[in-house]
Amino acid sequence: MDWKTGWRSFYYQGAPETPDPVLVRGRVALLVIDVQETYLERPDPAGLAGEELARFHAWTPFHTRMHGTVLPAIQRLLARFRADGNPVFFARIACLRPDGADRSLSQKKPGWNNLLLPQDRPDSQIVASIAPQPGEIVVTKTTDSALTGTNLRLILSNMGITHVVCAGIFTDQCVSSTVRSLADESFDVIVLEDACAAGSDALHERELEILNRIYCEVMRVEDLLGYLPA
């Protein structure tokens, strides 16, 4: 798929082709969102039955995508950004209190988003295969957006960042919320399709279509690498 005409919603059908991004060394940053150990943990299916086993199988495509596509893509991005001297940031969900009292309301409601991830617990950490290196900034959030409730916007502005490249999970939740916040703060945003995942491919594709052109430009890692200044 050609990124300049792909992932277009109803609103942008027939719109002019997207212009090439102009990326300046030191002013483009990579932001890896919520790729944490808790999301890659899986129970032993031999001990599951009924609804639990069905749910295990329902999540298998996500885990296949994460290990086969998303993590390798993020590793490739990290290597390039680090080699070029462009800033790398991470965001993760983690609460400061063990009881999670400091979480936002969305993370206290029953259901999928009811997360209790104390900041020092192993499952709240960034996945080891893409772990931050010394000097790379990690913001801790109790919200979906990596800007809401953190000082990330201020840090990006202080460092002169104009373009933020987003990768991570989940496309339709924390990635989407972060992208919208960045766009509202007048950052140019690029979302990398093959470096993101949602709970299902359908949710992933639909959210990219919603975000594309108005809140960000959607492309793939290979596309971005051609625009990054060496």
Image (spheres, rainbow, N blue to C red):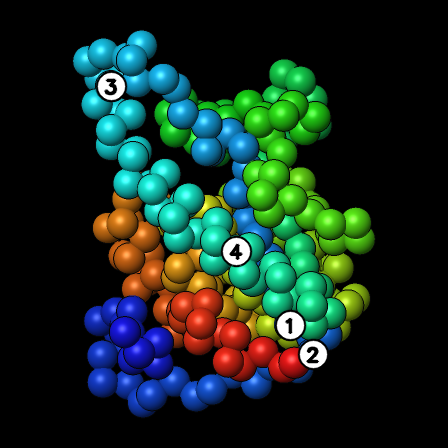
Between discs 3 and 2, the one toward the N terminus = 2
Would you call the spot at circle 3 few (<14 residues within 10 Å), some (14-19), or many (20 or more)?
Answer: some
Tag 1 residue: 28
Instruction: Report the Cα–Cα distance between label 4 and label 3.
Output: 30 Å
- The amino acid marked with disc number 2 is Arg
Q: Please tell me whether mark 2 sits on a helix, a strand or a loop.
A: loop
Instruction: Report the Cα–Cα distance between label 2 and label 1.
Output: 6 Å
- The amino acid marked with disc number 4 is Ile
Tag 2 residue: 25
Residue located 29% across and 69% down the image: 7
Tag 3 residue: 53
Q: Please tell me whether mark 3 sits on a helix, a strand or a loop.
A: helix
Q: Where is 197 relative to 224, above or below?
A: above
In which quadrant of the rendered view does residue 85 lie? bottom right
Tag 4 residue: 74
Instruction: Report the Cα–Cα distance between label 3 and label 1.
Output: 43 Å
Between discs 4 and 3, the one toward the N terminus = 3
Q: Please tell me whether mark 1 or mark 4 is closer to you in this view.
A: 4
- The amino acid marked with disc number 3 is Leu
- The amino acid marked with disc number 1 is Val
